[in-house]
Amino acid sequence: MSKTLIPIPLESSSGDQTGALQGFWEKMRATVGLVPFSEEAVAGYFCAVDPSTPARVKVILVAALAYFIMPADMIPDVIIGLGFTDDATVFWAAWSAVSAHITEEHKRLACQSWIKA
């Protein structure tokens, strides 16, 4: 099943986007179908911009999502089959550390940000 991201206006998420997440939606659109943790990354994004999320959790999520956004990292994303393995490792470590703070509302918002193409 193919999915296409609908860019969510920042005003509708919380308006609290940090500089580290400015390229998040562009990266998600560019990598749709390539990143196995896409929906979780979007849920993590909504958790990171949620004003009720504890600061420690926000820092962990923003760091993991910023690593995903970075064009140059340990394994370049353009390497087919390996390019997102380092991103996935960093993201899943962060997800494991903060998953108790990712609410059903964050997951619902993540699901709503996708449409079937």
Image (tube, rainbow, N blue to C red):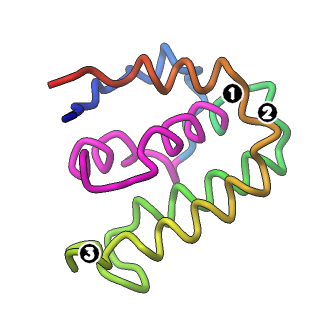
Residue in view at x 52 percent, y 19 percent: 109
List x then y, in percent, for residue 67.
Answer: 50, 66
Please name the residue that numbered disc 1 is placed on. Answer: 50
Residue 95 placement, left or right of 32: right
Which residue type carries mark 2?
Thr
Q: Which residue is mark 2?
A: 53
- Measure how far apart labels 3 and 2 are at the Cα level: 34 Å
Residue 4 on the magenta segment? no
Q: Contact, CB < 8 Å: mark 1 with mark 2?
A: yes
Nearest to the observer: residue 7 or residue 113? 113
Residue type, numbered disc 3: Gly
Q: Residue at x 45, y 23 (%)?
A: 111
Is 9 positioned to the left or the right of 50 in the image? Answer: left
Q: Residue at x 79, y 33 (%)?
A: 53
Residue at numbered disc 3: 81
Tag of residue 21: none
- Give the vertical position of 63 relative to 100 (above or below): below
Where residue 107 appears, x then y in whole percent? 59, 26
Q: Relative to 69, is 51 above or below?
A: above
- Label 3 crowd bin: few (<14), some (14–19), many (20+), radius 10 Å: few
Q: Is residue 35 magenta?
A: yes
Residue 97 sits in quarter: bottom right
Q: Identify the secondary structure beneath mark 2.
A: loop
- Kind of residue indicated by mark 1: Asp
**Figure check: 84 above or below 61:** below
Segment tinted magenta in the rendering: 19-47
Q: Say whether disc 3 or disc 2 marks the residue closer to the N-terminus.
A: 2
